Amino acid sequence: MKGKIILLSSIVLATVGISAYAGPEQDRVAFQKFFHDKFPRTPKADFINGIYSIDAASREQWLEIEEFPPYEIAIEEGEELFNTSFKNGKSYADCFENDGKNSRKNYPYFDPKRAEVVTLELAINDCRVANGEEPLKYAKGKLAAISAYLSFVSRGERINVVIPDNAGALQAYENGKEFYYRKRGQLNFSCFDCHGAASGQRVRADRLSPALGHVSHFPVYRSKWGGMGTLHRRFKGCNEQVRAKGLNPQSQAYKELEYFLSYMSNGLEFNGPGARK
Amino acid sequence: MNAIKLSKYFVRGLVTFALGLCTASMAADQADFDALWNEANEKRKAAAAINYEWRDTGEFLETAKKEQAAGNHTVALALIAKALEQGSDALAQAEREKDLWQARVPK
């Protein structure tokens, strides 16, 4: 009898829990609505353009830059690298279907066997290591160039992160989410403090871009960097801006952060690589 | 033994004694430093383990080592104090955020 009551009450509790929080999809709908409400004049598909989706003044300059995009060299370099054979005669095309075309949309994903999030950059290095080559550095350089090329040949595909019915995958998503909303660093800011609540506002010389669409256009050429950088390079830079110690690109926390943040932008188009200040 | 010889011994003894004191206090300084440095570094590592280390804490600790080696004991201790405070603040921040973050999620 006692056992039955306990069982019954735990079923009731579980049901209440489920109705209070239905999971990632409920998060995504609320997240997107937050930005649609905050910037009602921005067409929903335009959030992939970062700050330029909400700031008409800088959009003009940016459109001019896009006529001779500074990331073009990286795309060419990436294409050449992609098509160069490894020492064992194989190449990236053996790892990425369809010569890499439209492969961007397959990342990030959760691999239940490895029990980790696999990003595009990780997959590029996995391909190298599987073929006896040294892995590349994750923040910039050749890896960013290959990533730029694969993003370019995947433009127009939609972000479509799937969270499989797997405890590890859900945990990875939850970890990424928690990382995003937690304040950290000496200045005590969360990502969302700047890119959610305060998005559109000015800090020093910059205006803060909305988080919706943040992952769509990476890697980017940044004039401040004088070159290309991956999404995780940007994560690190933003952590250090608030005087938190930045983590390593492709660390577990950053992969999970990318997993969460990409899921939030599901439905938007990939338009990388991009150009930013 | 004449008076001159006596005073020579006396001076020599005094110098040895003073040198001894000085070495002892330097050793004490070093022990102080090491203990505090380790304490601050443990705090830093505890924060790092939960992705909560602050940006400059490690640098304060590295600089403290250099200052100590250069004999600038006071400066070195001040740097450790800053690192220690940052480590504690970072851990407190992590603890505080355990629940607070939930309120920021758009509903």
Image (cartoon, grey):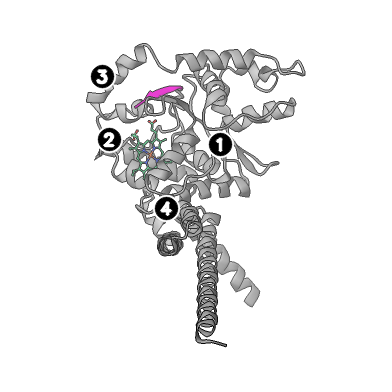
In the rendered image, residue A241, in percent from the top left (x then y), is placed at: 37, 43
Furthest toward the front, the residue is B2
Instruction: Calculate the distance from the C-alpha at mark 3 to the C-alpha at mark 4.
Output: 34 Å
Q: Chain of mark 2?
A: A
Q: Residues within 10 Å of mark 3 (few under 14, many from 20)?
A: few
At 34% from the left edge and 27% from the top edge, which residue is drawn? Answer: A277
User: Dot 3 falls on which chain?
Assistant: A
Q: Which secondary structure type mostly characterizes the magenta part of the structure? A: strand
Query: For the residue labelled by badge 1, is the local secondary structure a helix, a strand or a loop?
Result: loop
Count how many numbered circles sit on residues in the image.
4
Q: Which residues are magenta?
A: A273-277
Residue type at the position of mark 4: Arg
The image position of residue A152, as x and y in percent, is 50, 18
Q: Secondary structure at mark 2?
A: strand
Q: Earlier in the sequence, mark 1 or mark 2?
A: 1
Q: Position of residue B12 (x, y in %)?
A: 54, 77
Q: Is residue B71 magenta?
A: no
Residue at x 68% of width, y 27% of height: A127
CB under 8 Å between discs 3 and 4: no
